[in-house]
């Protein structure tokens, strides 16, 4: 089955789920389904991905891991540049283009990150963030098989992200496949320490990952703000001019927040 058909079915499933909420949480109405997928993903990671990433990190020289990360990061900068331009962030988009040009030439096809050393900041943008900047709401939280945390908006954006990846057109196919597997393992290896800490600290790993991911994703879409510019401005105005009832309950609320 092609990746496009798989993603189409995923989007169709997300749409079907919209009529069968299993939770009172407005951000996660499909919690029953999401937890089942989370358990599946967790088992795949435990059996296959984490052991492979651990072996990769322990056996592969550090300079090789850095080179792999830089190479695929350079390819990702191409789509990041396009999304920054689509979002109207022309300065960042041009900076990304300069990064790709510099790293692809003097950086040996991106194996060396010369651009960062030259002071060109690395960004990370995808089409889900672009849709968010255009005002498309995120929709409910979704846990996708193998792909992990997402939202309805980001799931709809996935085909664009996948087919804009230059590596998808690499020939021959066996080289493309080996590179894709190496990329996934390298990315998982970079998260080994964080995942170990999470396993030790979180009482409910599903909730911890969901809430942390949603907060981080919101920050990515709105460039560090809590929401769209209009929403942020209203929140600031509300903070500057609290109503009488808010002033009355402010002190008790502060006291109880520490319980």
Image (cartoon, rainbow, N blue to C red):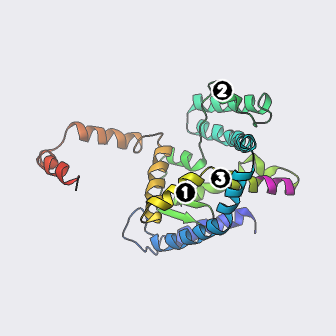
Which span of residues is magenta-colored?
173-179
Which mark, by number, is residue 171? none
The N terminus lies in quadrant: bottom right
- Please report whichever mark, 2 or 3, sits nearer to the chain's N-terminal start: 2
Residue extending farthest to the front is 58
Residue 183 lies, in percent from the top left, at 72, 51
- Marks 2, 1: nearer the viewer: 1
Q: Which residue is mark 1?
A: 195
Is the Cβ of the residue at disc 1 closer than 8 Å to that at disc 3? no
With respect to residue 73, does 128 lie above or below? below
Q: Which residue is mark 3?
A: 189
Q: Quadrant of residue 4?
A: bottom right
Q: Which residue is mark 2?
A: 117
With respect to residue 184, does 116 lie above or below? above
Rounded to the nearest angstrom, the CA distance separating label 1 from label 3 is 10 Å
Residue 117 lies, in percent from the top left, at 65, 26
Residue 76 lies, in percent from the top left, at 68, 43
């Amino acid at each position: 089955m092609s990746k496009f058909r798989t993603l189409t079915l995923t989007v169709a499933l997300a749409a079907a789920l919209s009529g069968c909420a299993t939770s009172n949480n407005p951000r996660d109405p499909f919690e029953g389904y999401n937890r089942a997928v989370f358990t599946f993903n967790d088992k795949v990671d435990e059996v296959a991905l984490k052991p492979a990433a651990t072996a990769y990190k322990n056996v592969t020289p550090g300079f090789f891991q850095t080179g792999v990360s830089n190479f695929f990061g350079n390819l990702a900068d191409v789509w990041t540049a396009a999304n920054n331009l689509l979002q109207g962030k022309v300065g960042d988009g041009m900076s990304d283009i300069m990064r790709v040009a510099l790293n692809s030439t003097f950086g040996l096809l991106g194996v060396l990150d010369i651009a960062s050393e030259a002071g060109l900041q690395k960004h990370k943008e995808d089409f889900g963030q672009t849709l968010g900047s255009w005002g498309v709401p995120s929709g409910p939280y979704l846990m996708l098989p193998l792909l992990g945390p997402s939202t309805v908006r980001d799931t709809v954006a996935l085909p664009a992200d996948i087919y804009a990846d230059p590596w998808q057109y690499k020939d021959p196919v066996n080289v493309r496949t080996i590179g894709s597997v190496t990329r996934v393992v390298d990315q998982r290896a970079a998260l080994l320490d964080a995942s170990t800490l999470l396993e030790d600290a979180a009482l409910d790993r599903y909730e911890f990952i969901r809430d942390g991911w949603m907060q981080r994703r919101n920050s990515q879409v709105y460039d560090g703000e809590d929401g769209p510019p209009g929403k942020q401005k209203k929140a600031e105005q509300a903070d500057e001019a609290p109503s009488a009832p808010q002033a009355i309950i402010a002190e008790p609320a502060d006291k109880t927040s520490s319980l």
